[in-house]
Image: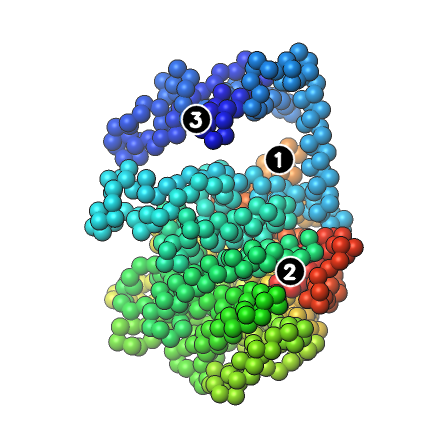
Amino acid sequence: MASHPVLGKRYLYISGDHPLLFTDNETNTARLFGTPNANPYVKDGINEAVVAGHSQAVNAAQTGTKAAPHFQLILGPGQSEVIRLRLTEIDPQTLSTTYPDRGNPFGSHFDTVMQARQKEADAFYARITPDSLSADAKNVMRQALAGMLWSKQFYNYDVTQWLKEHGLADRASLQHSSIRNKGWFHMANADIISMPDKWEYPWYAAWDLAFHTVALAMVDLDFAKDQLELMLDERYLHPNGQLPAYEWNFSDVNPPVHAWALMRVYTIERALRGEGDIAFLKDAFHKLMLNFTWWVNRKDPDGKDVFGGGFLGLDNIGIFDRSSPLPTGGHIEQSDGTAWMAFYSLTMLQIAVELALHDPAYQSMASKFFEHFLWIYNAMDPLGAQADGLWDDEDGFFYDVLRLPDGQAQRLKVRSLVGLLPLAACTVLLPDQVQRLPEFMERVNWLYEHRPQLVGNIPALRDPGPNNRRLLAILDETKLRRVLTTMLDESEFLSPFGIRGISQIHREHPYVLNVAGAEYRVDYLPGESNTRMFGGNSNWRGPIWFPMNLLLIRGLVTLYAYYGDEFTIECPTGSGQQMTLWQISQELSLRLSRIFLQDADQRRPVYGGLEKFQTDPHWRDYILFHEYFHGDNGAGLGASHQTGWTGLVAWIMKTSSSVTDFEAAFEMLSARQKGPRSPSNRSQARESEVSGSLPVEGMP
């Protein structure tokens, strides 16, 4: 029996005679820090008893804050055993009046209930899975989504209490301490959160969570919305506006993708339910304003709209540790940091436009973020050739810039996702939006008349383009072609399984920089990192990462909404095969999906050379959703059980199989701006929930 002051009592019934093991959820300080444990029964006690055989590690009195039944089973090849457990609020005294079979909680009705739940689950996944998918793809998609649901976990962390337990009882004592998270005294987490890695070490990260919500919205829309709201709650969001990064350093800087995820989930709900939750969008927008202001005030060191921020989630992608003082002095002007802020500005513009369609007062906020984007755009690519700018016109690529203390600067010419990210910074306005936002367009026209230096080389939002739509983007058509030529080159970024983190060109031509007698280099490493660079345990120097691939796909689809079929380019580069941007987005989606699907030899790239998983019928159809994937062969790397953002493959599979006619999908969703859908149209919207999500990702 478990008792909780709020939840009350719960009883766990176990079929058969199996002992219960009890311990307490307390840190084993003796193991970790060499100091005596305050309690003899600590959080790894059950593991010690079961794995190491140390029976004294669990409480013989059978009390504690952690408990588990101990099953000892011996199974031969091909054999199985059923374990029956039932957690309920029904106490043993009332069993006979509640359950048939003389109060047996595991009678025939138990199997009936389990069978009914199985049928319900089958029906649920059948409804959201496209019929056009193969049986294998349906299996992959279902497991990806089931993993997202499984990764929910209650997370309890009161930072003030934690600091007190480490001898820091007040804010004055924190001033002279180097303890982590000391600035997050306000934080009190006591919520169910989607974990990137529930199995190995439960923790949450703000940018991981944003991607989680996009996949979760397919199966639990309300939970996805709750997760986005949670990170903006006053118990989480710092008073200065910073979003918490992750447990071991809330003050680190994650990429600003929260607003994008918010708009994505809002759009999915609009397609599912016929209308979006404006109150949800409005409340989050106001709090995101605080976060946006934090970025502007804290991560633009020279006040010239060129942003930094450290790793920005991309751990070891750069030549230096971007979160630490540089060996050269000075600082790095980050192409990805600046592109992230352009992306953030345009997403906030999208939200403001959507809100302005319901409340014209938000037109001024749309104007604010339009101007923010213009300044960032011009910082990334100012008028006239710039020897020390982020854009390298000779290479046709964006790079980080090393700014030295004496003012000199040097481009760090590493071909990486850092230079591809500007592709994602784009949005399109529809004709109907332009007509309904006269104050916003008046400001746009004023800027074109009175601030020509801001708009001199930007795709013209003032003037309609193809299909009478208007574009805001970092890349104009010329730069777009140059960046895509590099990105779609199979000798550089384009892998059979998606876009690599770093160009394959660095395999034969590593980037090397010598500073004060020390050599710093970046090689192409398609698999695991060959060192624990910068204290991290992941590798961005070649592998394929789902979140970044998704944002590139999003950029391609948004740009297609503007350019349409008139814009084509070779894909792969040098193949002679011309594709539209829409077709390229579908090609990338198929390559990402291929990681998990059986090939002609019935082998899954995700399992690489693991023959047990490739050939054993008991294992080969159970999919692991890894953290990232080998840049050459697609094998899974990193945390093997981490569904997290890799669960996005379910969303990618659904969109790539459900959407065949971009314009039909685009017009279907954009038509709602002429008025809310009638109830009779909601079934069609529900069936096309993702048909309207990926293609119009860039647009409100």
Mark 2: which amino acid? Leu
| SS for callout 3 | strand
Circle 3 residues within 10 Å: few <14, some 14–19, many ≥20: some
Quarter of image, res 188: top left
Question: Of marks 2 and 1, which one's residue comes earlier in the chain?
Answer: 1
Question: Of marks 3 and 2, which one's residue comes earlier in the chain?
Answer: 3
Q: Is residue 264 left or right of residue 36?
A: right
Quarter of image, res 618: top right
Q: Is residue 90 above or below residue 175?
A: above
Residue 66, numbered circle: 3
Q: Are marks 3 and 1 in contact (CB under 8 Å)?
A: no
Residue 694, numbered circle: 2
Mark 1: which amino acid? Trp
Q: Is residue 520 visible?
A: yes
Quarter of image, res 163: top left
Looking at this view, is 462 or 645 the one in front? 462
Q: What residue is drawn where x is 50% and y is 30%?
A: 7
Question: How far across and down, in percent of the image, does residue 155 sit?
Answer: 45, 39
Q: Which residue is mark 1?
A: 619
Q: Are marks 3 and 2 in contact (CB under 8 Å)?
A: no
Question: How far across and down, in percent of the image, does residue 173 sit?
Answer: 21, 47
Question: How far across and down, in percent of the image, does residue 325 sit?
Answer: 29, 61
Q: What residue is drawn where x is 70% and y is 56%?
A: 274
Mark 2–mark 1 distance (CA, rounded to whole Å): 33 Å
Question: Of marks 3 and 1, which one's residue comes earlier in the chain?
Answer: 3
Mark 3: which amino acid? Lys
Residue ranking furthest to the top: 102
Q: Tell which tag, 2 or 1, sits nearer the viewer.
A: 2
Mark 3–mark 2 distance (CA, rounded to whole Å): 43 Å
Q: Is residue 440 left or right of residue 386?
A: right
Question: How far across and down, in percent of the image, does residue 276 sit?
Answer: 63, 57
